[in-house]
Amino acid sequence: MLEAYINGRLSYGLELKTETQILKGLGTGGEYSGIQTNATAYVPESPQLTNEIDIIRDAITQSQVSEYSPNMLVVNPIDWDSIQRRKVGSSDDRYVYGDPNSSWASTAIWGLIPVVTNSQTAGTFLLGDSTGAMVFDRQQSSVEISYEDSTNFQKNMATIRAELRGCVVVFRTEAFITGSL
């Protein structure tokens, strides 16, 4: 039971770290070179665009002008909540995004199904065409236990290591748009 618990917790933590690296890794010190790190900066068509829904639509247009058709959107849970709870106006109690009871209201925006993750910094977004990058998996996650590390045997201790090996290759930086919401 203890082994299953340790394997599960370490594998989960490793996957969270990998998700963050795929998105925002700096490409230095053993980090992935993340998709958002390599993405093209969002350039607003108009400074009057302050609504998250309009900004995402404008970024989609920027991507399409660059000959790409976005099929992914990554947002922070706080931003997705803000998008879904935006009201039409102070005197109108309807939601801009639609009826919360309808099944489509929580699944897509401008045809993009959002990936809602804490790995994305609040107040920012990433959208793009997933064909512009690829994740290579050299070694899937593994958890190993060793008693031979330093004085582990003498002190009756164990060293536990969780690792995986891979990288992200961004083939076309213009396939991805990132910016502030």
Image (spheres, rainbow, N blue to C red):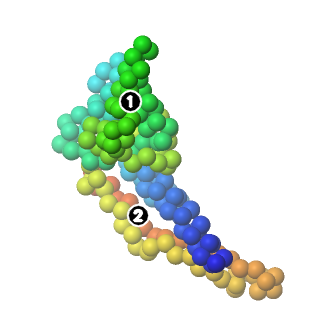
**Label 1 sits on residue:** 52
- Is there a contact, CB below 8 Å, between mark 2 and mark 1? no
Q: Nearer the viewer, mark 2 or mark 1?
A: 1
> Where does the image place residue 150, in percent across and percent down from the top left?
74, 81
Quarter location, residue 114: top left
Identify the secondary structure beneath mark 2. Answer: strand
In the picture as drawn, the residue positioned furthest to the front comes out as 101
The label number, if any, that marks residue 138 in the structure image: none
Q: Is residue 39 visible?
A: no
In the picture as drawn, the residue positioned furthest to the top comes out as 91
Residue 167 is left or right of residue 68, and the answer is right
Mark earlier in primary sequence (2, 1): 1
Residue 5 sits above or below residue 130 on the image:
below
Q: Which of the two residues, 100 or 177, is positioned nearer the viewer here?
A: 100
> Where does the image place residue 140, in percent across and percent down from the top left?
45, 73
Residue 29 is left or right of residue 52, and the answer is right
Q: Which of the two residues, 145 or 107, is positioned nearer the viewer here?
A: 107
Q: Residues within 10 Å of mark 1 (few under 14, many from 20)?
A: some
Residue at (58, 73) in percent of width and height: 7
Residue at (44, 74) in percent of width and height: 139
**Label 2 sits on residue:** 167
In the picture as drawn, the residue positioned furthest to the right comes out as 155
> Where does the image place residue 103, in percent across and percent down from the top left?
33, 43
Identify the secondary structure beneath mark 1. Answer: helix
> Where does the image place residue 137, in percent across and percent down from the top left?
39, 69
Q: Amino acid at mark 1?
A: Glu
Q: Amino acid at mark 2?
A: Cys
Residue at (25, 55) in percent of width and height: 131
Q: Residues within 10 Å of mark 2 (few under 14, many from 20)?
A: some
Q: Is residue 142 visible?
A: yes
In 3D space, how far apart are the residues under numbered discs 2 and 1 (Cα atoms)?
A: 31 Å
Residue at (43, 46) in percent of width and height: 116
